[in-house]
Amino acid sequence: MPFEDFVVCDADMHVMEPADLWQRYMTPEYRHAAPVGMTELKRDIRVKVKSQVLLRAGPVRPLKERGGSGIGWRPDQEAAYGEAEARGWDAQAQLDAMDREGVDLTVLFPTRGLFTLGIDSTEQIGADGLEPSFATAIARAYNDWLHDHCQLAPDRLYGAAKVAPHDIAGAAEETRRCVEE
């Protein structure tokens, strides 16, 4: 069977969300507390939620060892990511990468967005936790942004929705909204 007869799917491609995603997409009642993407480091994927900066990118190493930002990025990754970064990690950059790799369609997963719900609920840890309705608002804002991101090629870009486990009823409602809308 010729290769052209196959559909090549990447089931775990990640997006690089803009640092201001939550400031732009949060509902008005929670915009004052919206998570903030950090931008101090090269390709910074950290995010500040309430008073905590969240990151799961591995150990920090001296710059002389890594030759780059000191966190997670290597100099040889410039060729792979430099152009997409220059474009602001937009949907066209995503499609260009897919075309270079021979990928027909993909399911997009969060990068910075992975961390936004990484704090336990207020019911578990008290005032420093995420209020269930706030956690649901964070997930909804991400899902709205991801939907918009995928609209450049909705037949090729499929977003994996986020739901907040902090709020079971809200998670069910958000799942329903993402599927139906």
Image (cartoon, helix red, strand yellow):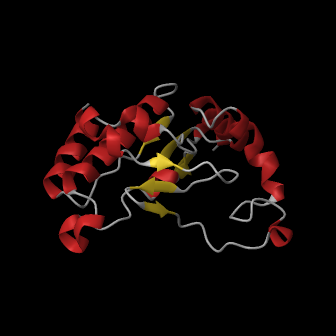
Of all residues, the one furthest to the left in this rendering is 169
Residue 135 horizontal side relative to residue 48, left or right: left
Q: Who's the residue at 25% across and 61% down the image?
A: 165
Residue 177, position as x, y percentages in the image: 22, 38
Q: Quadrant of the C terminus?
A: top left
The reply to whether residue 22 is visible in this rendering is yes
Q: Please, is residue 37 above or below residue 168 in the view? A: above
Residue 119 vs residue 169, the one in the foreground: 119
Q: Please, is residue 162 above or below residue 59 in the view? A: above
The reply to whether residue 109 is visible in this rendering is no
Residue 102 horizontal side relative to residue 111, left or right: right
Residue 54, position as x, y percentages in the image: 48, 62
Residue 132 vs residue 12, the one in the foreground: 132
Residue 50, position as x, y percentages in the image: 37, 56
Q: Who's the residue at 24% across and 65% down the image?
A: 127
Q: Who's the residue at 30% across and 42% down the image?
A: 140
Residue 79, position as x, y percentages in the image: 81, 46
Q: Quadrant of the N terminus?
A: top right
Q: Who's the residue at 72% across and 35% down the image?
A: 86
Which quadrant of the figure has residue 46?
A: bottom right
How many marks the image carries: the answer is 0
Which quadrant of the figure has residue 176?
A: top left
Residue 97 vs residue 143, the one in the foreground: 143
